[in-house]
Amino acid sequence: MEIVLMDNLWVIIGTFLVFLMIGGFILLEAGSTRMKNAGHIAGKTIFTAGIGSLVFWAVGWGFIYGEGNALIGLSDFFYGDASISEEGLAPAVDFMFQMMFALVALTIAFGGFAERAKLSSYVIFAVLFSALIYPVVAHWIWGGGWLADHGKQDFAGSTVVHLTGAMAALAATIILKPRIGKYNKDGSPNELAGHNQVYTALGVLLLWVGWFGFNGASTFEVADAFFGFVVLNTQVAAAAGAVTAMFVAWALTGKADVPTTLNGALAGLVAITAPAGFVEPWAAVIIGMIGGIIVVFSMRLFDKAKIDDPIFALSVHGTVGVWGTLACGLFAVPAFSSEIGWGQPGLFYGGGFTQLGVQTMGVVASGIYAFVVAFIILKVMDKVMGGIRVSEEEEMVGLDLSEHGGYGYPENIPNPNDQKGA
Amino acid sequence: MNRYVELKNWRQKYIKMVSTNHDELNHFHDELMRKTVECAMEKIQREWGNPPAPFSFFLMGSAGRFEQSVWSDQDHGLIFDGDRECEDYFLKLGKEIAHGLNIVGYPLCDGNVMASNPLWCQSLHRWKQQISEWLMEASWTSLRHFCTFFDSRVLIGDRQFLTDMKSHAITMINSHPKLYLRFVENVDFIKKGIGIFGQLLPESYGEQSGSIQLKQTTIFPYVNSLRLLAVKEGILDSSTLSRFHKIKDIYPSIYRFEKYFVQLLHFRLHFQQDAQSYQQVHLIPIGHLTRNDKKELKLFMKKGYELFSHTKKRIVNEWQAW
């Protein structure tokens, strides 16, 4: 019984750590965007976490883990269970831990909305994403759905959380179109620099620490203290991602660009999320390094393709989320996969292409589902709501004022009501 | 019609004819600027009478080095041999010159290095004092001012004024050899034009994205190296090419870079001849370059970096040997 209680304690600590990642996202997003939108970005993250929590409680958990079929769960709505069993997690602890992942996915999706979406679009999309997009993919992979049956490996959510969130962000950024001033008439991109790199760096650090819970507590138990190994993998991958991205940015542009370095750390973390419990530490370093390389090229590619991704959610969580998932199919060792009945070893450990195939199928199916459903939802919202983007004037004034009637930094922005001249 | 506008039209009509020949283009600029300054002098003379003291008007920056491209901004100063009371007259003249040159097609200098600024329009006596102060202070800004000043030549007026000041500076620097190191430090930063994979590094963002800043990445290492050597050897000529020729016998290993600089000047004019403004003139869109052009540009950059590193090493080593 003591062990069970310790399992529960460890996972609830993980829950707190993952919820603190929302604080990391607030700093990351606010720092990476302009001053006039800072209060809005911080505030919307808190209230969408509120919406996401209520929806997850009402239907999200039920769609993921309820009794149902290979595509969706259909029981346990409006969840509440105070029981504790002799083994495994107490249902409420499990519920809380899972809810945090849903909130992180939702926050990632909103990265694609930054600096130009109406507040009302956030409200409606938070409900629909938390009910119709995230739970379906989570059910497929974690809730005993059709991808779980194939042995899809996703230790803590490279696909379920990061890719799903990023695909919704992609749909949003395509429909919303680039921010005013991002591209010149000749198509060349401008750098709309974030207003506070210190916030961004602190955000990354907070996320990094939170990730110890995200990956570490995904062991769901304290047995063998395996969480220590998972955290070790997480740490070296993030470190490798940061260092590599900085080096790549320097090699390509001649400058060791700070935002790119920070995105490299996040890329390492996203990449190791799926393989954290399946690979050896040396492989974690390689996975983080490749994440750090991919993220730089992905950022440049989206910029060139005129897809304005203000906080690089598409690259960090999407492109690298795909890489992290596929990395399992390359580096998973037998001891942590076939020998414990969770999929097959990777290509480099004699598993052939079987696991890589399953991982690819998982990425493609989940990615397409998340993108298509998010695109349809946002298109319909766009029509019904008379646009999901604020007017040009509101965007230029900034969402702090236009959507909330106040400024994140009131002392630093002159009163826009003080009109000069005639 | 306003005389300045006439000069502007004259410029537009004829500059195309000389835009690909370095020498002819710079003689053209000299003639145009001389006419503009004379016009400004006449205007001030009409309004305020004859100049109260002898003076000389000198050019700095690319004009001072006789290295202008099709477009360049204004960098100039004025020395008068008189007392403080004359200053008002010459500042008025400086302002009129800046105004006229601006109309004719030389944009005002962002850094305010113009004879309309009291810092760059002073009596001979004050100028000498100013130069001594710059050198004694030896801060980054004061030495940057000095470097700007040192690339100067007289366009109108008595050449001896400028020669006297430069000689005064050289004497002072010779007695404080540590200044050579400070000069090196002053220009030690070179904007990178090539990455570690040998690729060109254009601007990443903004309307300049995809273009190379030719001045900062490629031309400056040559100009700065030769200025360092000119200061060290007491060479008063302001153009990089003349400086190359003057150091030929002292530093044969540096003279071998002269041919690259000559080619670079030609390369620059070839790509800049159609530039429509000063903002455009230093930008080379790499999309417009052929494979060979890129190869050539990279060679100029590499040779420039090599030249600067070689110059730096020579100066530092010689200083250590003292």
Image: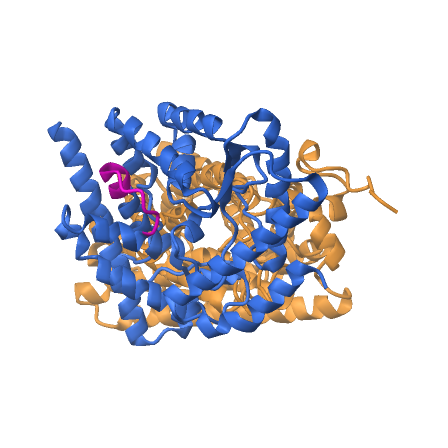
Look at the image and give the residue range highlighted in magenta: B228-239
Residue B212, x across and y down, in percent: 40, 61
Res. B23 visible in picture: yes
Q: What residue occupies the far front of the structure in this picture?
A: B50
Residue in the image at 45% along x and 42% along y:
B158
Q: What residue occupies the far right of the structure in this picture?
A: A422
Image side of residue A50 versus residue A26, left or right: right
A91 or A56, nearer to the observer: A56
Residue A48, x across and y down, in percent: 64, 48
Residue in the image at 44% along x and 43% along y:
A89
- Quarter of the image with the C terminus of chain B is top left
Based on the displayed image, in which of its 4 quarters is residue B204 positioned? bottom left
- Quarter of the image with the N terminus of chain B is bottom right
Please check the rendered image and state whether residue B9 is part of the magenta-colored stretch, yes or no.
Answer: no
Image side of residue B39 versus residue A21, left or right: right
Image side of residue B110 versus residue B171, left or right: right
A369 or A26, nearer to the observer: A26
Res. A142 visible in picture: no
B283 or B131, nearer to the observer: B131
A231 versus A192 height, above or below? above
The blue chain is B
Image side of residue A149 versus residue A289, left or right: right
- Count how many numbered circles sit on residues in the image: 0
B206 versus A227 height, above or below? below
Based on the displayed image, in which of its 4 quarters is residue A405 positioned? top right
The orange chain is A
